[in-house]
Each structure stands twice: as structure tokens, then as C-alpha cells.
Image: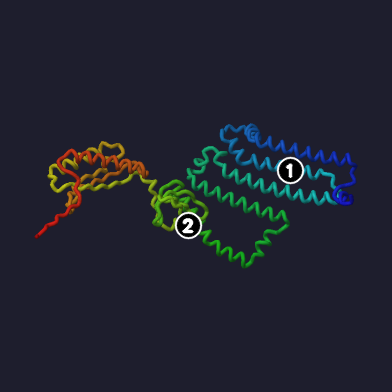
């Protein structure tokens, strides 16, 4: 009984039970309020602010609804627990602890809400990319991550101060450790600044096909430190931003057209007239193809090879993506086969003659 009075005041049984029931009722009310706000707060805010944008509710739901709902639940727990019939001495301890929990929970949930807001910012602001001067998706992603990191740092600082620590003195007290950290951070800073240069210069973006430092593939992601490239062998390679910015980058996706060279070898028995007719027909067939730039077509008798008369075929085509380019090249080569089959000639192959002197 003494233990009971150490925690609870000298209440009558009825008062004690009523206090417990009231605390349960308080939490239940806050619980249902949190569920209501989770489902309906987006619609309410949209109506109050008279927002017509269709994606606003989903953006609000993904940013603020869950943190708000969780905070209401925690607030319900705070009021329910502090309403319990504790004695005055123990009540001060419980109230102080629950106040700290409520403040830290509020700070963390505000931090989460702001991070979610940064991620969903394009959904809140219509035509955001146009309003920011046509910046690409990679740049928005990069600064989204930067904003989230800054929010987390400020959150950590505020929480440390909530526990009674002086952050300024803590940083000053790091001394040599802080200097060591600063030196170690030079590589991070170099890659970070290189990332800024890459994003503002815009040599490539996420989804582009590039070649850099002997590596070729599709850009999958760019973060504070590096660019991730998926090679055509399906390997994922991470390249530091400083290396990317310090090397030449070929962006194949930005090609306006793509050059193709094909060499065919005809039999040495082919007459000059037949050779010229084959060249003329191939050029005429390529000229009729809409995918090929007409003034770029070159079909000429190029070389006396060891076993063939070589014809060089060169053209620029508008499809630059790998599959489309190969499909067009196949179509051209089928045309060439049909044209060669029309004339009294054929494709040559390497031959050699063995003379038996016996």
C-alpha cells in the first residue's frame, strides 16, 4: 500500500477509477481525431486555401498527413498520462518527462514532414521546372537530397539542445578531432562541388547514355558524391563526381543523328558497269528512306581488297537509340542484299589458291 501511495495521491477509489477512465477516454478521442486528420486534413486544407490543383491532396497526404496524425496520438498519450492520479511529487517527474517526449516527438515529426514536403514539392507547385528556369530532373533531385540533409542536421542540433547540451561548446571541444574530420571531408567537399558543376553545366542527366573515363552506360543516379552508371553488361559502376567533372564526357543521347558506315565486298568478276549500277541503286534506295538524311548518303567504290572489290556505304540517320539504330541498319543491309542479288555478281569472301607442284 505504501508503494501505491508513492506513485498515486490519496484519492478515493471512485476518484481513482474516474481519473483512469478519463485518461482512457482522452486517448481514445485523440486516437480517432488522428485517424480523421489522416484521412480528411488534406481535403480540409485544400478547401480552406481554395486550391484547385488535382495532385495537391496526394502531395499533402504524402508529406504532412502521417506526421500530423502521429503527433496527435502522442499528444493524446501526453494528456492521458498527465491526467492520471499521481501524487504531486511523482506528477512533476512524469510531467517533465512527458513534456520532453512531446517536444522531441514534435521536432522529429516536423523534420519528417519538411523532408516529405521537399520531396513532394513538384506536386505542390505546378510547372516547377519551368518556374526554376528549365532545370533538369537531376538538379531537382540533387538539391532535394541537399535540403533533406540540412533539415536532418538542424533537427539533430535542436534535439541535442533539448537535452541540455551546448552545441557550440561541443563543436569547439572537438579540437584535433574536428580538424581531422575537416581534412577527411576534403574528398567529400571536392566531389560535392564537382557535382554542383556537373548539374549546372548539364552535360548529362538521369537516363542519358554516356561514355566517361572509358566507361559506357546509362546514368541511373547522381548523389552528393558520385554518379552511378549501369553498363550494357548490367553492371552498376559508381564514379566519383570529381573524376566525372575532370574527364571528357560523351553524351550519346544528345546526338541529333547517328553516322553509320558499312563496307561490302563484291566479286572481282564484277564488271565496272555492274559495280556502278549497284552503287547507284543502293544510293537511290537509301534516299527513299525517311529515317536517313539524304544529303549525307555516300556510296562509292572504295578499294581493291585482296579478295574483293570494296564498296563503302555511309549515311547519317535520325534514330539514335541503340535498338532503333540497329533495326534501321538491318533494314538497310537487307536492301543491299536485294540489290546485289539483282545483278550478275555476288558478295566476295576470302579465297586463296593452293598450287600442287608435284
Frontmost residue, 214 versus 253? 214
Kindly identify which residue carries mark 2.
240
Residue 203 visible in the displayed image:
no
**Picture residue at 14% right of the left edge, 55% below the top:** 353
Kindly identify which residue carries mark 1.
75
Measured along the vertical axis of the image, is residue 230 above or below residue 34? below
Frontmost residue, 326 versus 57? 326
Task: Give the structural element (helix, strand or loop) at label 1.
Answer: helix
**Picture residue at 40% right of the left edge, 52% below the top:** 216
Task: Give neighbour class at mark 1: few <14, some 14-19, many 20+ (Cα, 10 Å).
Answer: many
Residue at mark 1 to residue at mark 2: CA–CA distance: 45 Å
- Which mark is drawn over residue 17? none
Frontmost residue, 82 versus 182? 82
Instruction: Give the image quarter of residue 315.
Output: top left
Q: Residue 350 location, x and y as percent?
A: 19, 52
Residue 274 visible in the displayed image:
yes
Measured along the vertical axis of the image, is residue 178 above or below residue 57? below
Amino acid at each position: 500500500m505504501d508503494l501505491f501511495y508513492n506513485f498515486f495521491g490519496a484519492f478515493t477509489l471512485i476518484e481513482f477509477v474516474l481519473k483512469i477512465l478519463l485518461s482512457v477516454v482522452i486517448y481514445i478521442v485523440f486516437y480517432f481525431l488522428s485517424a480523421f486528420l489522416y484521412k480528411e486534413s488534406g481535403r480540409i486544407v485544400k478547401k480552406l486555401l481554395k486550391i484547385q490543383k488535382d495532385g495537391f491532396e496526394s502531395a499533402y497526404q504524402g508529406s504532412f498527413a502521417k506526421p500530423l496524425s502521429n503527433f496527435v496520438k502522442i499528444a493524446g498519450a501526453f494528456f492521458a498520462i498527465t491526467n492520471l492520479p499521481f501524487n504531486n511529487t511523482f506528477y512533476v517527474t512524469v510531467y517533465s518527462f512527458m513534456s520532453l517526449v512531446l517536444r522531441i516527438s514534435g521536432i522529429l515529426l516536423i523534420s519528417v514532414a519538411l523532408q516529405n514536403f521537399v520531396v513532394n514539392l513538384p506536386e505542390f507547385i505546378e510547372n516547377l521546372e519551368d518556374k526554376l528556369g528549365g532545370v533538369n530532373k537531376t538538379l531537382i533531385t540533387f538539391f532535394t537530397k541537399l535540403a533533406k540533409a540540412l533539415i536532418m542536421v538542424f533537427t539533430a542540433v535542436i534535439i541535442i539542445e533539448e537535452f541540455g547540451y551546448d552545441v557550440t561548446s561541443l563543436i569547439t571541444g572537438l579540437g584535433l578531432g574536428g580538424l581531422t574530420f575537416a581534412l577527411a571531408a576534403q574528398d567529400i567537399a571536392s566531389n560535392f562541388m564537382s557535382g554542383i558543376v556537373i548539374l549546372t553545366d548539364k552535360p548529362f542527366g538521369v537516363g542519358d547514355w554516356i561514355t566517361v573515363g572509358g566507361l559506357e552506360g546509362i546514368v541511373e543516379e547522381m548523389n552528393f558524391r558520385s554518379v552511378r552508371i549501369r553498363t550494357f553488361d548490367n553492371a552498376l559502376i559508381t564514379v566519383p563526381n570529381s573524376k566525372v567533372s575532370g574527364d571528357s564526357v560523351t553524351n550519346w543521347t544528345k546526338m541529333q543523328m547517328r553516322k553509320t558506315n558499312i563496307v561490302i565486298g563484291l566479286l572481282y568478276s564484277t564488271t565496272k558497269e555492274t559495280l556502278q549500277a549497284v552503287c547507284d541503286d543502293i544510293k537511290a534506295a537509301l534516299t527513299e528512306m525517311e529515317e536517313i538524311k539524304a544529303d549525307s548518303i555516300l556510296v562509292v567504290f572504295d578499294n581493291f581488297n585482296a579478295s574483293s572489290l570494296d564498296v563503302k556505304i555511309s549515311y547519317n540517320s535520325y534514330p539514335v537509340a541503340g535498338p532503333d539504330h540497329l533495326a534501321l541498319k538491318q533494314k538497310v543491309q537487307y536492301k543491299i542484299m536485294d540489290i546485289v542479288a539483282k545483278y550478275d555478281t555476288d558478295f566476295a569472301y576470302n579465297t586463296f589458291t593452293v598450287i600442287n607442284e608435284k
